[in-house]
Amino acid sequence: MLKRLFSIMLAVVVISSMFTGCGSSSAKNNQTTKNDSAEKSSDINSSSNAVTEAVQNNTDNENILIAYFSVPENVDTDGIDANSGASIVVKNKDVLGNMQYMAMTIQEAIGGELFRIETKEKYPLEHETLVNQAKEEQNEEVRPELATHIENVEQYDIIFLGYPNWWGDMPQPLYTFLEEYDFSGKTIIPFNSHGGSGFSNTIEEIKKLQPNATVKDDGLSISRNDVADSEQEITDWAKGFQ
């Protein structure tokens, strides 16, 4: 009888230890799962922080405005991989105006906000008609009405200002633009494309129109035939103002 009772007690102890072992193993597995989840959560948080940091870095230069005027002419782009030689750049089958391309390259290099200066009355895209109208507007000192306007000019400290050289001068919409805003205390950095005349006297004109702004003399002027191949030059130049 005693022997039988001892056997029963021994069996109870063995069974109890088996359940205890399973419980311990289960708890250990649960803890491991929790640790894995914590590590994954930590990884996700780290990744999220990295994304947030990247976004913050991308908006660090909200005080920079890249304003430009661009009229991409109608050009037959069949078979053209780079520059058309007139007023456009063809990159990956996208047709961009010279100044549009330069402005976008500046933004990619240093950030900032793009602003395209556009007129209510659209310019003709045929070359001869366009250049004739541009000359007539200069002779008459026309101030074309703008269709786009800067909402909060106070937030910008640096204005990159881009325009093509038309007949040795800025296009007339640039005069409208510079007479519309007061850039006192701000820095204006010109960039342009040209057919051989560089900036001509346009930087001096900008200084007259914005006498209380700091207008940089070391702007970037690129031949219209070379714009498509000037990505690195534009990038290096823009980064020099950071």
Image (tube, helix red, strand yellow):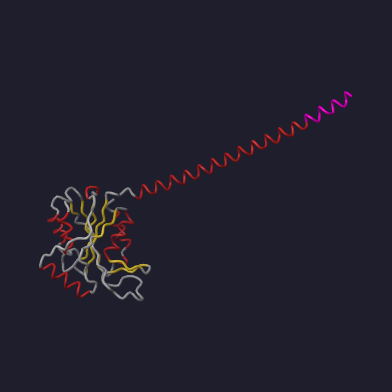
Furthest residue toward right: 1
User: What segment carries the magenta color?
Assistant: 1-13
Tell me the chief SS of the magenta region. Answer: helix
Q: Residue at x 16, y 67 (%)?
A: 168
Q: Is residue 4 magenta?
A: yes
Task: Describe residue 105's horizontal placement relative to residue 175 as left or right.
Answer: right
Front residue (pair 86, 199): 86
Q: Quadrant of residue 76?
A: bottom left
- Which quarter of the rendering shows the N terminus? top right
In this rendering, the count of numbered labels is 0
Q: Quadrant of residue 29?
A: top right
In this rendering, the answer to whether 105 lies above or below 126 is: above
Image spot of residue 241 (x, y percent): 27, 52
Front residue (pair 219, 75): 75
Image spot of residue 156 (x, y percent): 24, 49
Front residue (pair 50, 4): 4
Q: Quadrant of residue 27?
A: top right
Image spot of residue 195 (x, y percent): 22, 70
Q: Is residue 101 magenta?
A: no
Q: Residue at x 40, y 46 (%)?
A: 52
Q: Residue at x 78, y 31 (%)?
A: 14
Task: Describe residue 134's horizontal placement relative to residue 19 as left or right.
Answer: left
Q: Residue at x 22, y 71 (%)?
A: 124
In this rendering, the answer to whether 80 lies above or below 15 is: below
Image spot of residue 125 (x, y percent): 24, 72
